[in-house]
Amino acid sequence: MANQSFDAIVVGSGISGGWAAKELTEKGLKVLLLERGRNIEHVTGYENALKAPWEIPHRGRIPTAMRDAHPVQRRDYILSESNHAYWADEKESPYIEKKPFDWFRGYHVGGRSLMWGRQSYRFSDLDFEANAKEGIAVDWPIRYADIAPWYDYVERFAGISGSKEGLPQLPDGQFLPPMELNVVEKDVAARIRTHFKDQRRLIIGRTANLTAPIEGRNDCKFRNKCSLGCPFGAYFSTQSSTLPAAVKTGNLTLRPFSLVTKIRYDKDAKRARGVEVLDSETGQTYEFDAKIVFLCASAFHSASILMSSATDIWPGGLGSSSGELGHNVMDHHFRISASGSVEGYEDKIIFGRRPNGFYIPRFRNIGSDKRDYTRGFGYQGNASRQGWSREIAELGVGAPLKEALTEPGPWTIGMTGFGEILPYHENRIYFDKTVRDKWGQPVLVMDCEIKDNEKKMRRDMMADGAEMLEAAGVKNVRAADTGYNFGKGIHEMGTARMGRDPKTSVLNGNNQVWEAPNVFVTDGACMTSAACVNPSLTYMALTARAASFAVEELKRRSL
Amino acid sequence: MDMNRREALLRLATLLGVTTLTPQVLTAGATHPTSSAPVFGSADLALLDEIAETIMPATDVPGAKAAQVGAFISMMLTDCYDAPVQAAVNAGVDELATTYRRRFNEAFVGGSQANRTAFLNELDAEQKRYTASKRPEQPHHYFRIVKELSVLGYFSSEIGASQALRYMEVPGRFSGAEPYKKGDRAFYN
């Protein structure tokens, strides 16, 4: 029997894969969208989304059996009774930590677009030019002007709320109305702006939550239960946004339980023929053919699929001839916080649960500011009144304690810095073929660490955060480094970077694998540098741009 | 990055006293002796209910007993705490009942509210003194755990969240400067 054939195959259904499927189907291509895990239906699949707090048995605490069964997930907030089913099981899908690495994955339709943080920021030319100016790694093959129209395009569809600020390091976009800073955040913002003479600014976060309805989706209802899946479709996910658009064309075939084991490479044509799929339910193997393949399987899985492909020609896999495949792993380093208490404002309370906080854009190494490290960091945080879990030192037990805890407590404010990690060739992933996962696939070894530049930056992240809160009149300011493992940012990037030269990069400026121009990689793997902002919006823009290019090339018959 | 992450940070880094009692979820690599055997028998539930009710009593809003916090404490200790903590709380609650009976010549269950409140206030003062001076690696005072689970169980119950506090499943709007006057109930977040 002949292989099933499509115009395009998209591997992975997260933020990038969803966009690839939408763009390619809307341009008339017959698309096979492959997802290694199960399907989760929009709305009806969100099992805990409408449960009240008292319907969650352990009320947010972690049972010991769950904790002990998840030695990786328990390292961070992601281990939760409410959306446990959305995070990949590290026992089924192990990996090896040559150096400490937290790897948090979503193996289902929608991938991490269901649980993502939704913060959406543009890179600027400060970011795109930095490698070239500083002689670090390789130059991005694109500049802001190349991607700006694609940011416009994806923002309009995804629905990004935010304020226009006119900051060159954080370009404005096509925003829905901004969410509101609360009364304390507004005053802290004003004091920071005055104290630092407008060189530092606290703004409302730019988030992929709708502040006005757009076609087929409701505006945000301020429940702050996004990570359970939104029954209102009010934040951008594959399920709420790109998948319905792709389905609507009639050109999409979605195949869950489809673990792509390799790209099938035709060495004479120097093109991919299609992919090999292991059905993760039945264990059967299938082959599918296509004119083009979009790898959007997450930075590490897109790289590992390449590493497993065409190994008869290149032992390191398709795209490995530069020696950069699987290297240059990046993330954002964080978990440096500043916090304190705020006096007053007792006649104000917060109504609604805002799924967003404030953002302090990068201010270091900009203009005349020069530090003993390169690049920079931003902060995310929020102010709120303490709730019933606060300690009231002067009260013991009984009615006075109960009455006091039914009222809101004092205001507090806290924030954490998110810093850029440079692309270091030595930071890499590679296979250990002696260890296999549940599906018999070789597991990845993580060999990544932050270095001097990041460590110096962390000193500033700590001092600057405390300094800003002090300047804003916050009391009892404390700064803390609560520890960062590589990967904890859940922003894996760089394992198949874009560049200008096939000798030093895996992908060209249109996200094509140099050795196989009909293979595109548009997820975090493609990133040449990390900037200090959340990267998903950039994956969306790069994916839409590459999809448009791919279809034009197909029309010209040059793929 | 999302609110959960920011809030996780706030929980770790700031002033929220009681949340430090969360089981040691973040301790990677450590071994934890656990037991899934029930920490308390059904005969103990009435006692746990009365302890919780003394901590979070009925006022103009029903208290911990109506919210079945005794059963919640028992379930949480069994499911969410390591064996040494389970044993310490079990022994502590036994001792609480024994000492109370010796001192007031009545059982805690059915005892006078004034006696019970005075007694638990003494225990609370004791746990606060202990907590203030203990080294990080030393265990928590059993009564701190009982108090914390009583507060958690109460305010996250339907009665606590929607009567003692104001719970809105779908707020529908956001205001960062809603007028507030002393005495108004907080929103459950």
Image: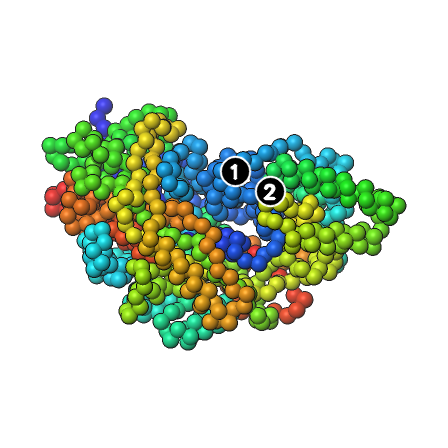
A127 or A517: nearer the viewer: A127
Q: Are marks 2 and 1 in contact (CB under 8 Å)?
A: no
- The subunit carrying tag 2 is A
Distance from Cα at disc 2 to Cα at disc 1: 26 Å
Q: Chain of mark 1?
A: B
Q: Is residue B67 above or below residue A469?
A: above
What residue is drawn where x is 31% and y is 68%? Answer: A369
- Mark 2 or mark 1, which is nearer to you? 1
Q: Quadrant of residue B162?
A: bottom right
What is the secondary structure assignment of the residue under circle 1?
A: loop
Camera-side residue of A88 and A506: A506
The answer to whether one can see residue A101 in this image is yes
Residue occupied by mark 2: A57
Up/down of A198 relative to A308, above or below: below
Say which mark, if any, is on residue B145. none
Counting from the top left corner in percent of width and height, residue A130 is at: 24, 59
> Which residue type carries mark 1?
Ala
Find the residue positioned furthest to the right. Answer: B105
Q: Is residue A248 left or right of residue B150?
A: left
Residue B30 is tagged as: 1
Q: Residue furthest top?
A: A1
Q: In the shown orientation, is residue A410 left or right of residue A433?
A: right
Residue A191 in the figure: left or right of residue B132? left
Residue A489 image position (x, y, % from top left): 39, 49
Residue lying at 51% horizontally and 72% vertically, measured from the top left: A473
Q: Left or right of B152: which side holds A148?
A: left
**Structural crowding at the residue carrying mark 1, measured as other residues with C-alpha within 10 Å and reported as few (<14), some (14–19) or many (≥20):** few
Task: Give the answer, above or below, for where A71 lies relative to A135.
Answer: above
Q: Secondary structure at mark 2?
A: loop
Identify the image's colour scheme: rainbow, by chain, secondary structure or one colour: rainbow
Q: Is residue B6 visible from the viewing direction of this image?
A: no
Q: At label 2, which amino acid type do we have? A: Pro
